[in-house]
Image (cartoon, rainbow, N blue to C red):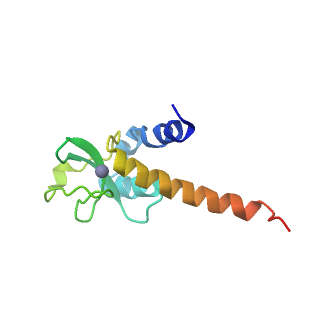
Amino acid sequence: MPRGAADLAVRTAPTHEDLLALPAEEAFAELGRRHRRREPLAFRRGGRAGRTHLVRVQGGQPLCRAKLAEAGPQELAVTGPLTCPACSRVVARAIHRTSGRRARRVTPSKV
Ligand SMILES: [Zn+2]
């Protein structure tokens, strides 16, 4: 497995079962934070391939370009794992971006 893919698996495979102990709204908000998003997120199965996407709680639409039907609240879950590769890429990019920014801040730039 190439390094990027292994990294991605580590970042997206957690099922976040510890969040089940929280009230739903807090759990969704925390899930959003874990994926470097300011909005609450949830997992949702759907689309043609029946993959699990990461969706915005508001509106129930996935982070990827898949178009899902309107979600009922019972379709939103706080535990994964995420199985949509496109959603995983969006998440990995966001994580890469934020950790890159942090690294630059502490690394003196070349003169
Ligand atoms: Zn997706």
Q: Find residue 88 and report its horizontal and vertical position in percent.
A: 40, 48
Tell me the residue at 75%/61% (across/down): 106
- The reply, left or right, for residue 74 in relation to residue 56 is left
Q: Of residues 45 and 78, which is closer to you in this image?
A: 45
Q: Of residues 87 and 77, which is closer to you in this image?
A: 87
Tell me the residue at 77%/60% (across/down): 107
Q: Find residue 87 and report its horizontal and vertical position in percent.
A: 36, 51
Residue sitting at the far right = 111
Q: Find residue 80 and report its horizontal and vertical position in percent.
A: 33, 41
- The reply, left or right, for residue 42 in relation to residue 101 is left
- The reply, left or right, for residue 5 in relation to residue 68 is right
Tell me the residue at 14%/55% (across/down): 72
Residue 67 vertical position relative to residue 46 in the rendered view, above or below: below
Q: Of residues 79 and 108, which is closer to you in this image?
A: 108
Screen quadrant of the C terminus: bottom right
Question: How many labels sit on residues?
Answer: 0
Tell me the residue at 28%/57% (across/down): 62
Q: Find residue 44 and report its horizontal and vertical position in percent.
A: 24, 48
